Image: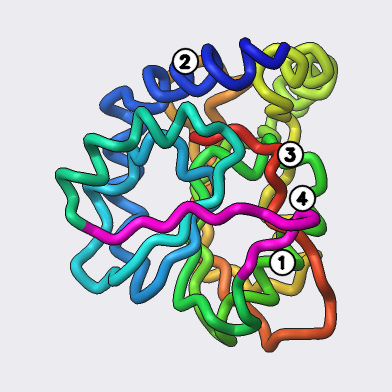
Amino acid sequence: MGLYRDFFLPRAINRTCGQPQYLELRREVAPALRGEVLEIGFGSGLNLPYYPESVTRVRAVDPAHAGRELAAERIAARGLPVEFLELAAGRTPLPDASIDSALSTWTLCSIADLEQTLAELRRVLKPGAPFVYLEHGLSPEPRVAKWQKRLTPLHRFFAGNCRLDLEIERALRAAGFALDSPKRFYMQGSKLSSYMYQGVALAPAPTCARGSASPDAPAR
């Protein structure tokens, strides 16, 4: 699984998530970013072309070094400073309340310990800072949701731990984030994997909790 996860999977994700309908959604969510951005699941840099001018630096978290190779050309073309963070004991080497905004696109579904990762986001984000998210998750249709739950164990095995049945908004609220105008909709494609959660989650005041931006999630 090492070769598959570290070499083939990042390239498959780059191809799939680089399709026009995905790029259009990236274009739609990126304007909410500003200042220093922490991007979880930076991958091959597919979001870079859509970062607004208000962004000054990107702190990138990604476990697959293959993504960095795929991202090199996009980083050079965008001309925006990108720093890849090496995790120590599952934590980002960032001070408390030091990040102006954060981004995750199709990544939270693959994080092994989402609760800890969201706690780490709370720690590093400034109070009231936006966490911009664009994720697929559990459908509101009972029949679809039933099959999502049935197929998730198999899907996680082949798709880098990706869950089909994650309720993104519930997880964000449980972590203390306030949701700002969340949207839900189906993208084109199978209903099993095309129900989208999109919005901005506002960071609360920092607490003493210490989490981790998990290195287990493949880049999207």
Instruction: State the mark number for residue 166.
Output: 3
Residue under label 4: 114
Magenta-highlighted residues: 80-93
Residue type of the residue flagged with mark 1: Glu
Residue under label 1: 120
Instruction: Check contact, mark 1 vs mark 3: CB within 8 A.
Output: no
In front: 36, or 179?
A: 36
Residue type of the residue flagged with mark 2: Ala
Tag 1 secondary structure: helix
Taking the image as drawn, is residue 140 in sight? no
Above or below, 210 against 137 in this view is below
Q: What predominant SS class does the magenta segment belong to?
A: loop
Q: Is residue 175 left or right of residue 71?
A: right
Instruction: Check contact, mark 4 vs mark 2: CB within 8 A.
Output: no
| Mark 3 vs mark 2: in front | 2
**Residue drawn 67% across the image and 33% down it:** 139
Above or below, 149 against 205 in this view is above
